Image (cartoon, rainbow, N blue to C red):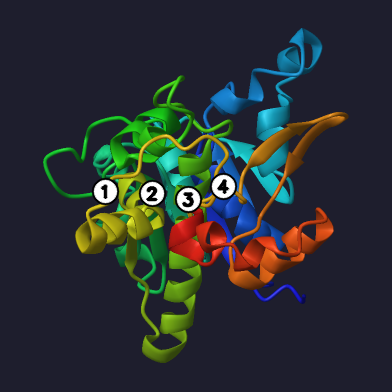
Amino acid sequence: MSQPFTGVRVLDFTQVFAGPFGSYQLALLGADVIKIERPGGDDMRYGPPNKEWSDRGLGTGWMAINANKRNIALDLTKPEAIAIVKKLAETADVVMENFRPGVMDKLGIGYEALSKVNPRIIYAAVSGFGQTGPERTTGAYDGKIQAMSGLMSITGSQESGPTRAGFAVCDAIGGMSLAFGVASALFQRTHTGKGQLVDVAMLDSALTFMSSFVVDYTVGGHVQGPSGNRAQSRLPTADLFKVKDGHLLLAVNNDKQFIALAKAIGHPDLPNDPRFIDWPSRI
């Protein structure tokens, strides 16, 4: 794929995971991303794999989602730093941030201030609960959003109870939503010539990915609980099985696949058995 965002300049104030993951998508697609960190750097710089790398500010979590970016350090409590930001904003296409709503406004570099400097600027903010509403200033990390969205309630097993997914999936979803919002705003700007505010809430993004479970309940009354490794189809032939040399994942979700499975295990007659004749029978 070509790099469609070549020539697009991004001022990236994001930190930790959700925001940097979003700006990283734009960097991969050619955008000139200038990551602006506080003196001392993003918290993600300090962590695994070991003390040596952490002491150098090169934690693997930071490196994984901040490649292809240029870096500068600014103390945003200093007037001269704010002046630099406004100067950079004059020629920037996009500003991205994931502070709590209102922080950038207090610093004098929120959307209203920067849109006066550059009316074409696209200002994209990702937070736990969005820029408006009663929870707007409430902090959020991935685990909190996994819990509030219901994702943890369908992850794990009946024995384990609600379980957090093995990686920061809600951070990633929020970051991808942020990148998609920026891409959409850049396209719209080709028609209007104007920038805009892109407001992404991590909770909204996560709930979007939970929509099929909401519809399943609304239409059929089914409340999904922890289902281990079984697929959303709820079929026993779409699950993880312990075998002699490890584990085997089957993803047999439809009749055609079930017929093929029956042949593969030496029981081609199974699809004609009344107990397994169709999808409802096999649940």
Crowding at mark 1 (Cα within 10 Å: few <14, some 14-19, many 20+): many
Circle nearer the viewer, 4 or 2: 4
* Marks 3 and 2, how far apart at CA: 21 Å
Do callouts 4 and 2 mark residues in contact (Cβ within 8 Å)? Answer: no
* Marks 1 and 4, how far apart at CA: 39 Å
Give the quadrant of residue 1: bottom right
Q: Which mark is residue 234?
A: 3
Circle nearer the viewer, 1 or 3: 3
Q: Residue at x 29, y 36 (%)?
A: 148
Circle nearer the viewer, 1 or 4: 4
Q: Is residue 244 left or right of residue 194?
A: right
Secondary structure type for disc 2: helix
Give the quadrant of residue 82: top left
Please give the residue where the numbered disc 1 appears in the rendered image. 130
Secondary structure type for disc 3: loop
Instruction: State the image coordinates of residue 246 (x, y, percent, origin top left).
Output: 82, 29
Q: Residue at x 69, y 72 (%)?
A: 6
The answer to which of marks 1 and 3 sits earlier in the sequence is: 1
Instruction: State the image coordinates of residue 125 (x, y, percent, origin top left).
Output: 37, 51
Crowding at mark 4 (Cα within 10 Å: few <14, some 14-19, many 20+): some
Crowding at mark 2 (Cα within 10 Å: few <14, some 14-19, many 20+): many
Instruction: State the image coordinates of residue 79 (x, y, percent, origin top left).
Output: 38, 36
Please give the residue where the numbered disc 4 appears in the rendered image. 236
* Marks 4 and 3, how far apart at CA: 7 Å
Please give the residue where the numbered disc 2 appears in the rendered image. 206
Q: The disc labelled 4 sits on which kind of residue?
A: Pro
